[in-house]
Amino acid sequence: MCSPMVIAHVAAQGPADRARGAAASAQAPKPATSSPKRCFTHVVDLTHPLPTDFPSASGEIWLEIEEFLSYATHGINFKRWLVHEHLGTHLDAPIHFSESGATAEQIPVEQLVVPLAVIDIRERAEQDPDTELTPEDLRAWESRHGPLPEGCCVAVNAGWDRHATGPHYRNADDAGIKHFPAVHVDTAQMLLEERHVVGLAVDTLSIDHGPSTDFPTHRKWLPAGRWAVEGLANLAKLPPVGATIAVGGPTIVGATGGPSRIFALV
């Protein structure tokens, strides 16, 4: 997630804003204090296939594919891609919204294979596409399932993956304002201050809901050394607790994120 408008907005920030982001990035999460033995019986793919017309944050085409070599002519198939980093099922690295945070290839692998807590807000999202995951939602989930797992990723199941190939994924109104669910900034603050959580995940375009123009959840979460994944699929196939998410993020040096293969071990 980020349209050219977002990039321009970030670039217009003053030094004081950037300094705050740099200071926050020093708060990268420590590894979990324990590493419980894990096992699984099956794998759930949380990744949408990525065609060239997958809906982007701006509504523009963000993926171009060119045939570089063909089997008929060269005896080999080889393509060249031109792709925006924040398209489809993808990773947001801390550097995406901070001056000196970790780039995608710098995120420790032990922070990319972690317990997964899935919080279901589908019923509310069906009625209100601008809804956000709140601290009250977290407390209600914990009252039913126990404390969030140590060092986990919190995923929001809004049921939005079913819209991924059509215009309702962006859900823009006549004024161009998008409408889709995400994570309230107060929830991000609670997870940073009161829980040991390393990742946020959504099945929508962004961890900030559609109408947002200043992206407070991105600005709170990523500079604190955390990562996010956006555009997940198949969260409804997972239990609320007990699965492990594995984020196969890009390893391009300096990447702020990128399309990723993400799956859950259940």
Image (cartoon, rainbow, N blue to C red):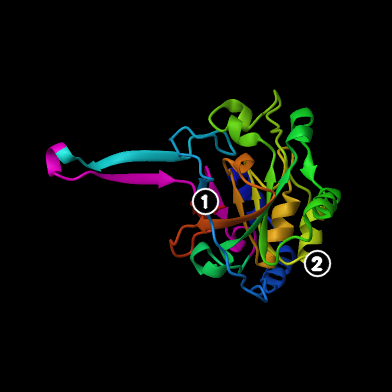
All told, the count of numbered labels is: 2
Q: CA distance from mark 2 to mark 1?
A: 28 Å
**Image quarter for residue 121?**
top right
Asked if the residue under mark 1 is in contact with the one under mark 2, i.e. CB atoms within 8 Å, the reply is: no
Mark 2 is surrounded, within 10 Å at the Cα level, by few (under 14), some (14 to 19) or many (20 or more) other residues, namely few
* Left or right: 98 in relation to 137: left
Residue 186 in picture, x, y percent from top left: 82, 54
**Image quarter for residue 32?**
bottom right
* Left or right: 193 in relation to 262: right
Magenta span: 72-98
13 or 80, which is in the foreground?
Answer: 80
Check the image and report above or below for 226 versus 1: below
64 or 187, which is in the foreground?
Answer: 187
Residue 204 in picture, x, y percent from top left: 64, 40
Check the image and report above or below for 185 versus 161: below
Residue beneath the point at 81% across and 60% down: 190
Amino acid at dot 1 = Phe
Amino acid at dot 2 = Glu
Secondary structure at numbered mark 1: strand
Q: Earlier in the sequence, mark 2 or mark 1?
A: 2
Instruction: Tell me the residue that label 2 is attached to.
Output: 193
* Left or right: 108 in relation to 21: left
Mark 1 is surrounded, within 10 Å at the Cα level, by few (under 14), some (14 to 19) or many (20 or more) other residues, namely many
Secondary structure at numbered mark 2: helix
Residue beneath the point at 77% across and 54% down: 145
Instruction: Tell me the residue that label 1 is attached to.
Output: 263
Residue 113 in picture, x, y percent from top left: 55, 62
